[in-house]
Amino acid sequence: MMKKAFTLAEVLITLGIIGVVAALTMPSLIANHKKKVYVTGLRKAVNTWNNGLKLMLVTDGVEYFNDTEFARTLLEEGYGYGTVDLKQYPKALSILNKYIKMTPLNKTVNNIKNLDGSNASGSDSSYVASGTTPDGAFYSFKLDWIHFSPSYLETTMYGGTRSSINGVIIVDVNGPKAPNIIGRDLFLIFIDVRGNIVFAGSQRDHELFGQSHYCDHGASWGCTGHIAEKGWVMDY
């Protein structure tokens, strides 16, 4: 018995239906894939800094970040406050590279946006990259209070809240490439006085700062903690 073949009209209708379904689902699939790429980059950055700092403290045989050879050398080379320009501190850079491979940049990235697509304002509208790692991620970091003794920071200064933070790091997982949106490819982490990584927006962050970083449609620096607490998923 001869099998009935599809007619040309039936084939065209089927292809049309497939095209419509693809048009409806592809944007969502692409968006979800990008989210996974951003989260993978964030997790890699966190591991890079977390492992590097732990090794730094163990190698130096110290308990506090301020007592590391890297922090002390930065002070000896004249660092005071603000974004670390690694080009200005070659000895400190050499020490950092033992633990975290970093190429110095001092490059400004502008036109930062909020989650809702609006332009970020004030100091959130741009950042100066201190350096880049081999995977292309940019890092802007400054070190707070490294000229104070750790015990003073933990027990006295500001009641042991904000002073328990020694470092502030902006992570741009894909460097200057788009979208440069806070909470998408731009994230915030901290270094506490004992060299631990603290996620912006986490409970630990709220305890240390006495204020909140949120993951919403404004300057969503708190999305780092949100993603980590959701099992490293960007569910927004």
Image (cartoon, rainbow, N blue to C red):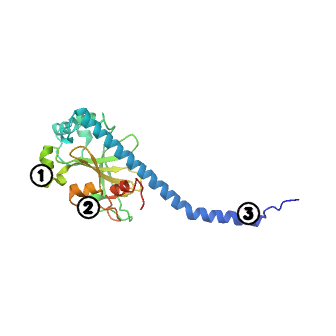
| 232 left or right, relative to 198 | right
The residue indicated by pointer 1 is 157
Image quarter in which the C terminus is found = bottom left
Work out how far the residue at label 1 is from the one at label 2, CA to CA, in angstroms: 20 Å
Q: Residue at x 20, y 59 (%)?
A: 210
Q: Residue at x 38, y 48 (%)?
A: 43
In this view, the residue in front, 188 or 102, is: 188
- Amino acid type at circle 2 is Ser
Measured along the vertical axis of the image, is residue 41 above or below residue 4? Answer: above
Work out how far the residue at label 1 is from the one at label 3, CA to CA, in angstroms: 75 Å
Classify mark 3: residues with Cα within 10 Å, few (<14), some (14-19) or many (20+): few
- Marks counted in the figure total 3
Q: SS for tag 1?
A: helix
Q: Residue at x 42, y 55 (%)?
A: 233
| 97 left or right, relative to 150 | right
Q: Residue 234 lies in what quarter of the image? A: bottom left
Q: Residue 2 lies in what quarter of the image? A: bottom right
Work out how far the residue at label 3 is from the one at label 2, CA to CA, in angstroms: 57 Å
Q: Are marks 3 and 2 in contact (CB under 8 Å)?
A: no
The residue indicated by pointer 2 is 212
Classify mark 2: residues with Cα within 10 Å, few (<14), some (14-19) or many (20+): some
Q: Point out the tag, 3 or 2, that comes first from the N-terminus.
A: 3
Residue 220 in the image, given as x and y percentages of width and height:
33, 60
- Residue 174 in view: no
Tell me the tag on residue 48.
Answer: none
The residue indicated by pointer 3 is 11
Residue 12 in the image, given as x and y percentages of width and height:
72, 64
